[in-house]
Image (cartoon, rainbow, N blue to C red):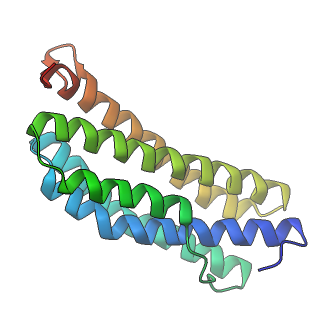
Amino acid sequence: MALNTFKDLFYNRLCDIYDAEKQLSQILPTMAESAQSDELRSLLNDESKSIDMQLSRLDSAFRTLGVDHDSVISKGMRGIVEEAEEIIEEDGDPSVKDAAIIAIAQEMKHYEMAAYGSVRSWAKDLDLPDVAKLLQDSLDDEGDSDKKLTGIAEGSMFAKGINKQTPR
């Protein structure tokens, strides 16, 4: 796809996010199964279910734009997913693996937040307020998920987080 206009760039990155979400829909259930912590497993399962909402918002954005999503492959997310697959396959202490799963899940969230933040801003610049709102909603969801992952890693006032439980 040629990037001749700002709208071309916007569409290309929107397609990248769509593929990234599709990739996550495949790996998150496996990450959840690999987690020892019930809290982490539950959050990853919830995240897996929320991808349907993310994809629905993206589908709405494409409909608003009057286009279908193109077959862009999110190479950035592909790399992160490959790292997740390696972590899942590793042997080791379960709490250390949980810490690694949290870290890779946060990498996924940060990729999504950067992507959603950019295209949301571009939607505003392209005078697409309805699309910008959909993208903002997804950006908000990703930020909330990232905070929950941090909470599991670091714990709360009354509980030790996974980071504190890992063998030193």
Asked whether 91 or 38 is in front, the reply is 91
Q: Residue at x 74, y 59 (%)?
A: 129
Asked whether 167 or 2 is in front, the reply is 167
Residue 161 sits in quarter: top left
Q: Residue at x 44, y 50 (%)?
A: 108
Would residue 106 appear left or right of 38 to someone viewing this image? right
Residue 64 vertical placement versus 150 (above, below) = below
Q: Residue at x 9, y 40 (%)?
A: 94
Would residue 98 appear left or right of 70 to someone viewing this image? left
x and y, in percent, of residue 97 in the image: 18, 41
Quadrant (top left/top right/bottom left/bottom right) for the C terminus? top left
Would residue 56 appear left or right of 33 to someone viewing this image? right
Residue 53 vertical placement versus 157 (above, below) = below
Would residue 124 appear left or right of 91 to someone viewing this image? right
x and y, in percent, of residue 54 in the image: 46, 64
x and y, in percent, of residue 126 in the image: 84, 62
Q: Residue at x 54, y 71 (%)?
A: 18
